[in-house]
């Protein structure tokens, strides 16, 4: 009997070792030939039949787990119900959304809409918002086979999460489907732990990796964007040699030679330059909130030197609207009332969130400053030309920049007091992927009210 038991144990051990040895996260695929006209890029996406460039709408969805996803959903629902008329055509404001940039919890809503469009309003609540995703992840992790898999150095908790999202939420869709669907351009943001900078799941970034994005699962991008530190492991990508014929973006060329360290163009070029060094053979990604917890910096870069900048120069954009859905919380401070220092778990949580929240405030301030600077320049130029016309009619006028009306709207919980709600209820909601049905309902309901406040 003993030898039989021993043989069984040996067989089980060998089987478990084999499972651990075979556990490997799926690698992004190498790209053999560079093609600027292919891949998931804004310039390559088709406009919808009811979408125009004249009114250019960008959405930014912040992090914050299910809280952020539900708030973003409520705002999307309100945009869908808001009628507008552009170029004589009646439509909804949602029809005019051109870009959605998101991080962490907001990435679930952004990616789901990008992939499935109207289905967001039919089944996203049951598929994600009202589900205990956190519990499902724990149950998946506690499966004996998965406990062995995560023992492998090449497979982590983030890969289990991506598998769950792929099967249960995103129907195994890849970025090819996002490309086929056309606008809005969904930018899923993560953080590259190496240089500590933002990483976007766009073909422009994957070009720098020598890789194809069209075959990559959207679920893994969302998992990277929402990989909260300590709870989940980083998600890894391979940094291949750049494809034959690779041509960097126009704004990258010469940007580093200028040594103008305080411009967005130099900073973005420095970020992209990291991937040219192939000694950096792998890219390890964590929660996008570590680099930008409200998702606006990708839009700022597009405005400063990217596709939004180009469309303004071409005179296509007449009105630029940016709606920031900021699910930032501000829990009551109880630490300062205690004599004993906080436990390590509390310290870890604060370490991960305090910097995010502080950085979010700076991002909003910078956003308003950069966008409204253009408005001020337009007004100053018009004023100078009027003076010239009045006092020196024959003098040449200042060259006028393309005129764009710019509107920035921030949806945040602190504004709840202006609509008769208690902001403390929302500001004290936890950052988790498991909220009660009443909490979900209140979050979805407050979004439209805050948008109109």
Image (cartoon, rainbow, N blue to C red):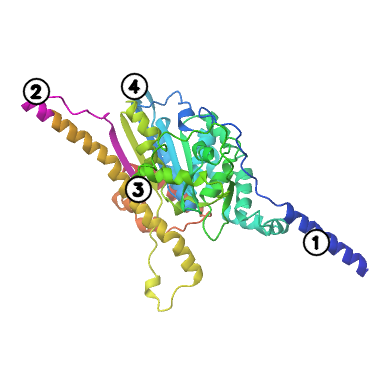
Q: Give the spatial CA distance, label 4 vs label 3.
A: 42 Å
Q: Which mark is residue 393?
A: 2
Residue 109 x/y as whole percent:
49, 43
Does dot 3 land on a helix, a strand or a loop?
loop
Question: How many other residues sit within 10 Å of disc 4, few (<14), some (14-19) or many (≥20)?
Answer: few
Q: Image height check: is 146 above or below 32?
A: below
Occupied quadrant, residue 149: bottom right
Q: Give the spatial CA distance, label 2 vs label 3.
A: 41 Å
Q: Give the spatial CA distance, label 3 vs label 1.
A: 56 Å
Q: State the residue in front, 76 or 342.
A: 342
Occupied quadrant, residue 89: top left
Mark closer to the observer (2, 1): 2
- Mark 3 highlights which residue? 261
Does dot 2 land on a helix, a strand or a loop?
loop
Residue 373 x/y as whole percent:
25, 40
Question: How many other residues sit within 10 Å of disc 3, few (<14), some (14-19) or many (≥20)?
Answer: few
- Mark 1 highlights which residue? 13
Q: Image height check: is 292 above or below 94?
A: below
Q: Give the spatial CA distance, label 2 vs label 1.
A: 91 Å
Q: Mark 4 vs mark 2: which is more N-terminal?
A: 4
Does residue 130 appear in this view?
A: no
Mark closer to the observer (4, 2): 2
Mark closer to the observer (4, 3): 3
Decide if residue 288 is on the left or right side of residue 326.
right
Question: How many other residues sit within 10 Å of disc 2, few (<14), some (14-19) or many (≥20)?
Answer: few
Which contiguous range is marked in magenta?
386-412
Q: Which mark is residue 438?
A: none
């Amino acid at each position: 009997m003993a030898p039989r038991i021993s043989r069984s144990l040996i067989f089980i051990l060998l089987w478990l070792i084999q499972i651990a040895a075979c556990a490997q996260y799926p690698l992004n695929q190498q790209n053999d030939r560079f093609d600027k006209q292919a891949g998931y890029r804004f310039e390559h996406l088709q406009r919808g039949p009811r979408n125009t460039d004249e009114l250019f709408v960008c959405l930014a969805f912040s992090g914050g787990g299910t809280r952020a996803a539900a708030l973003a959903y409520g705002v999307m629902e309100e945009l869908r119900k808001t009628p507008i008329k552009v170029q004589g055509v009646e439509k909804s404001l949602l029809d005019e959304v051109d870009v959605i940039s998101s991080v962490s919890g907001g990435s679930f809503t952004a990616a789901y809409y990008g992939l499935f469009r109207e289905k967001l309003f039919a089944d996203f609540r049951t598929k994600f918002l009202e589900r205990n995703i956190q519990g499902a992840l724990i149950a998946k992790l506690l499966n004996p086979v998965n406990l062995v898999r995560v023992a492998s150095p090449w497979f982590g908790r983030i890969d289990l999460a991506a598998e769950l999202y792929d099967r249960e939420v995103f129907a195994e869709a890849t970025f090819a489907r996002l490309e086929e669907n056309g606008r809005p351009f969904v930018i899923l943001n993560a953080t590259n732990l190496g240089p500590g900078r933002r990483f976007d799941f766009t073909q422009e970034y994957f070009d720098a990796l020598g890789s194809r994005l069209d075959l990559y699962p959207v679920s893994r991008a969302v998992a990277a964007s929402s990989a909260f530190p300590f709870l989940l492991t980083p998600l890894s990508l391979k940094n291949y040699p750049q494809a034959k014929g690779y041509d960097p973006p126009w704004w990258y060329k010469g940007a580093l030679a200028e040594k103008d360290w305080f411009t967005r163009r130099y900073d973005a070029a420095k970020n992209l330059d990291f991937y040219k060094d192939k000694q950096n053979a792998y890219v390890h990604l964590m929660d996008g909130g570590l680099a930008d917890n409200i998702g606006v910096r990708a839009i700022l870069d597009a405005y400063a030197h990217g596709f939004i900048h180009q469309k303004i120069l071409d005179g296509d954009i007449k009105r630029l609207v940016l709606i920031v859905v900021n699910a930032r919380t501000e829990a009551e401070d109880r630490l300062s009332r205690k004599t004993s220092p906080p436990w390590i778990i509390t310290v870890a949580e604060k370490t991960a969130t305090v910097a995010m929240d502080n950085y979010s405030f700076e991002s909003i301030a910078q956003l308003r400053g950069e966008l409204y600077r253009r408005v001020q320049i337009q007004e100053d130029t018009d004023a100078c030309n009027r003076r010239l016309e009045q006092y020196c009619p024959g003098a040449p006028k200042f060259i006028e920049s393309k005129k764009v009306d710019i509107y920035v709207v921030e949806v945040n919980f602190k504004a709840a007091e202006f609509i008769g709600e208690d902001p403390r209820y929302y500001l004290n909601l936890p950052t988790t992927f498991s909220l009660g049905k009443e909490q979900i309902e209140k979050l979805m309901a407050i979004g439209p009210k805050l948008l109109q406040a």
